[in-house]
């Protein structure tokens, strides 16, 4: 999908977040790392609610990257258990509030119990019309582009697609986010300033917002500051400011049918 203008009052249609800093938050408090992850999960609930209130259409959260398998085995196992618990506890609440849940990424390495919980939560909320909550789990931007390219290659092999007909738009249609607008705003908490293999294709024209705030402390006020920063930016998509201003002027002057 291509980037689209934000919604009413400059609210980003799609916000993507790397929720970084859980382990450091726990370490500062002499707690085990999993305590930081639990605190981070609690924080998600408030951010989902605030996103819906603000008029955000899609909220994508990077929960577990394809590189996170390199962490200590005990931490990985506890993260899997926490994911199952969060899904089992929150799916019904999401459904009652009209939130549609989707998980993107390669879920095949996950324990069967987690795969079943994901499938059940997605099925329960599939037809909801409110905020779309996307959880990126065992996800990587390289994986996403590779699996899209593999599908295109299969079509070429089958003779249903000519290589010359492959365009950026066609490839984007095979990404895991194909039916979603590209993110307008990318947020990373925890002080790091990189995208860590997250939505590599989709972030091409996204506005970035980095903060030192650790994820469990990233509250509604911090989120509102990120949204306010977005509203203050001019997104030119390769054009110059004068072109955008002229285009906005034409939209303002256009008659209402």
Image (cartoon, grey):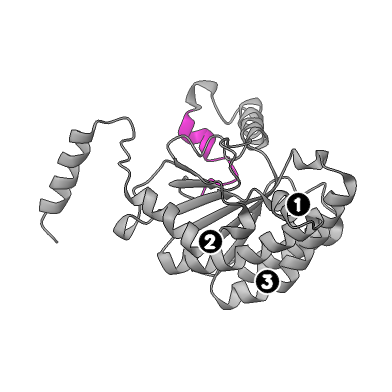
Quadrant in which residue 152 is drawn? top right
Q: Is residue 242 above or below residue 33?
A: above
Q: Secondary structure at mark 3?
A: helix
**Residue density around tag 2, few if under 14, some if 14–19, many if 20 or more, within 10 Å:** many
Q: CA distance from mark 3 to mark 1?
A: 27 Å
Give the total number of marks visible in the rendering: 3
Residue 172: in magenta span: yes
Please state which of the two labelled residues, at mark 3 or mark 1, is closer to the viewer. Answer: 1
Residue that label 3 marks: 90
The one nearer the camera, 231 or 39, is 39
Relative to 110, is 163 on the left or the right?
left
The one nearer the camera, 71 or 135, is 71
Question: Which residue sits at x=83%, y=49%?
Answer: 76
Question: Which residue sits at x=30%, y=36%?
Answer: 236
Question: Which residue sits at x=82%, y=38%?
Answer: 70
Quadrant in which residue 30 is drawn? bottom right
Whichever of callouts 2 and 1 sits on the residue coming sooner in the sequence is 1
Please state which of the two labelled residues, at mark 3 or mark 2, is closer to the viewer. Answer: 3
Q: Which residues are magenta?
A: 167-179
| Residue 72 visible in the shown view | yes
Residue that label 1 marks: 27
Q: CA distance from mark 3 to mark 2?
A: 14 Å
In percent of width and height, residue 170 lies at 50, 35
Whichever of callouts 3 and 2 sits on the residue coming sooner in the sequence is 3
Relative to 24, is 48 on the left or the right?
left
Q: Is residue 82 above or below residue 179?
A: below
Q: CA distance from mark 2 to mark 1?
A: 33 Å
Relative to 113, is 42 on the left or the right?
left
Residue that label 2 marks: 132
């Amino acid at each position: 999908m291509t980037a689209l203008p934000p919604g009413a009052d400059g609210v980003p249609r799609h916000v993507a977040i790397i929720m970084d800093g859980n382990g450091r938050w726990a370490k500062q408090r002499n707690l085990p790392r999993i305590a930081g992850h639990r605190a981070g999960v609690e924080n998600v609930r408030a951010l989902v609610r605030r996103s819906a209130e603000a008029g955000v259409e899609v909220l994508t959260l990077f929960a577990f990257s394809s590189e996170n398998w390199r962490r200590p085995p005990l931490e990985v196992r506890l993260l899997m258990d926490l994911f199952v618990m969060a899904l089992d506890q929150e799916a019904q609440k999401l459904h009652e509030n009209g939130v549609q849940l989707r998980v993107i990424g390669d879920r095949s390495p996950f324990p069967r119990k987690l795969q079943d919980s994901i499938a059940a939560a997605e099925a329960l909320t599939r037809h909801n019309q409110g905020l779309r909550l996307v959880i990126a789990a065992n996800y990587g931007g390289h994986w996403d582009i590779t699996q899209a390219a593999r599908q295109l290659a299969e079509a070429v092999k089958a003779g249903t697609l000519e290589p010359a007909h492959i365009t950026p738009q066609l490839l984007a249609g095979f990404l895991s986010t194909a039916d979603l607008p590209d993110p307008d705003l990318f947020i990373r908490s925890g002080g790091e300033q990189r995208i860590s293999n997250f939505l590599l294709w989709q972030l091409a024209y996204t506005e970035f917002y980095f903060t030192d705030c650790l994820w469990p402390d990233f509250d509604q006020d911090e989120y509102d500051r990120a949204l306010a920063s977005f509203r203050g930016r001019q997104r030119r998509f390769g054009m110059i400011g004068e072109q955008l201003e002229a285009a906005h002027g034409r939209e303002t002057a256009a008659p209402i049918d």
